Image (cartoon, rainbow, N blue to C red):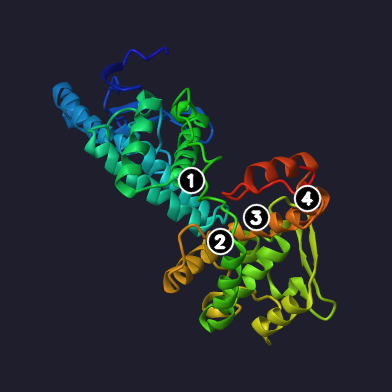
Amino acid sequence: MKQSKQSQLIHIWEDYEFYLSIPKSFTGSNKPYIYFYYLDPKTNKSARIRKYIGKNDGNIKLIRDEAKKLILELVTLLNDNWNPLTNLQNAAVINSTSSIEECISYWINKREEALKNQSIAKKTLKNNKILMMHFRSFLINRSLIHVKARNFINIHIKEFLDTKAFERNWGKVSYNTYLIDIGTFFNYLKDLKIIKDNPCDKVSKKNTRFDSTRFKVFEKEELIKVSSLLSNDKRYFGLQVATKLLFKYNIRPLELTRLQIADLNLDDKLMVLPPSKTKNGNEARFKLDEETTYLLKQLIGDFPKESFVFGGRNKPSELQVCSDYFGQNWRFFKNKHKLPNHLKLYALKHTSNYYDIESGASYEEIRQRNRHANLQVTTLYIKERLFKNEIKPSKSELF
C-alpha cells in the first residue's frame, strides 16, 4: 500500500499496521494523526481509521511519544473485540487458534441466542450446559482447558466419556447420548472451519442391541400390576392416561407432550396429531376406544382448547411440559411403588407390539400403528426390539 512521505509505520500488532502522519506544517487545522486499516466484518471491506493527536508545538519527539501511547490504548481495545466503526464491542469470535475453553463459551452463547430465537427448547439448552459442565471439569482435571480445539483427537473424547461414565455411573444409552451431544458441538466447530475433522467420529458407540434391560418386554403379570397401581393412584392419573395412549396407540412420549385439547374430537372418538406434532412429520389419526375416550374426558374437563392435554399436577396447562416430563413421572411412580428397574416407560410400546405379534397380528398392522415408512423398517424393529429373555418350546405336536 503506497504511503505519503509524511506517513511512517511505527507499530505492528497482529494484522494491524499503525502509521503516524505528520503534516508538513502545523498552520490552521493541520494536526498529526495515526491511522490503521480495519476490516469491517459486516461488509468484509477495509476502512481507514484515523485518530488525531496534539500538535505538541511541532516537537516530533513528543508527537511520536503521544502516538505510541495512543496506539497501546487502541491495541488494548482491539484485543477486547472493539469495533472502531461503531465504537462498540463485537461479539466474541473464535478461529482456528482458539482454545477449547473459548470455543465452549462461544457455543453456549450461540445456544442461548438460539433459545431466544425459539429455534431450540429450554431442555436442549439445559442439556447442552450440563454436557459442557462435565466436559469442562474433565478438561481442567487433565490440564487441557487451554489447548487449541484443533488439537483434540478421538482419544481425548473417549477418555472423557469413559471417565465420566465411571464417575456418574452412566449406562450404555447415556454414554451414547453424551457422545452424540458432544459430537454436535464439534460439528459446529467443523462448520466454522475451526477444526478439520470431528474427533467424535472415530469414537465407537456402545452396543445396545443385546442390552436386555433397555427394551425388555413386560411380563403379563407385570403389566397387570402396573395397570392396577396406576388406576388406584390418583396422583398419577395423567401418567395413567399417557401410558394408555403409549401402549394402545404407540404414541411416543414426546408427541404426547405436544398434544392439545384442540386435537381431540371426543364426540367422534377421534384424535388427530398434525404433522408439526409427529416424529415423522406426517399427520396421524387415531380412533379412540371407549376406555381411552372416557379417561381423556375426565382429564381435560372444561379447559380451553388451546391447553396442552398433559400439564403438571395431572391437569391440562397452557404451557407445554418438557420432553422428559413423562420419564420423570414414571421414575417417581416406580420409586413410590418399588417397581423393578427393568420396567422402562418406553418398553410399554414394545410390549403391546410383542403381545399383538404373539396373538397373530400381521407385520402390516404393526407397521401402521408404529407409523413406520415401510415393512423393512418394521421387520428390523421386530427383530431387534420385540424379544423376551426366555426360549419357548415348539408348538408342533408331530414328534
Q: Are marks 2 and 3 in contact (CB under 8 Å)?
A: no
Give the mark, 1 or 2, whose residue is nearer the N terminus: 1
Camera-nearest residue between 212 and 380: 212
Q: What is the C-alpha distance between the residues marked 3 and 1?
A: 17 Å
> Where is residue 188 drawn, in percent x and y?
49, 36
For the residues carrying marks 4 and 3, which lies nearer the camera in this image? 3
Residue type pointed to by label 1: Val
Q: Which residue is mark 4?
A: 367
Say which label, 2 or 3, has the lower sequence index. Answer: 2
Which mark, by number, is residue 173?
Answer: 1
* Vertical relation: 14 (above or below) 358: above
Return the residue found at the far right.
268
How far apart in space, not on screen, are marks 2 and 4 (Cα)? 21 Å
From what the image shows, is residue 306 above or below residue 376? below
Camera-side residue of 158 and 386: 386
Tell me the residue that label 3 is attached to: 350
Which SS class for mark 4? helix
Most extreme residue toward the bottom is 302
Relative to 196, is 223 above or below?
below
What residue is pinned by disc 2?
Answer: 345
- Cα distance between the residues tagged 1 and 2: 15 Å
Residues packed near mark 1 inside 10 Å, few (<14), some (14 to 19) or many (20 plus)? some
Q: CA distance from mark 2 to mark 3?
A: 10 Å
Q: Are marks 1 and 4 in contact (CB under 8 Å)?
A: no
Residue 314 in which image quadrant: bottom right
Q: Amino acid at mark 2?
A: Leu
**The residue tagged with tag 3: helix, strand or loop?**
helix
**Which quadrant of the view contains residue 289?**
bottom right
x, y percentage for residue 312?
Answer: 53, 76
Residue drawn at (78%, 45%), measured in percent from left and top?
A: 373
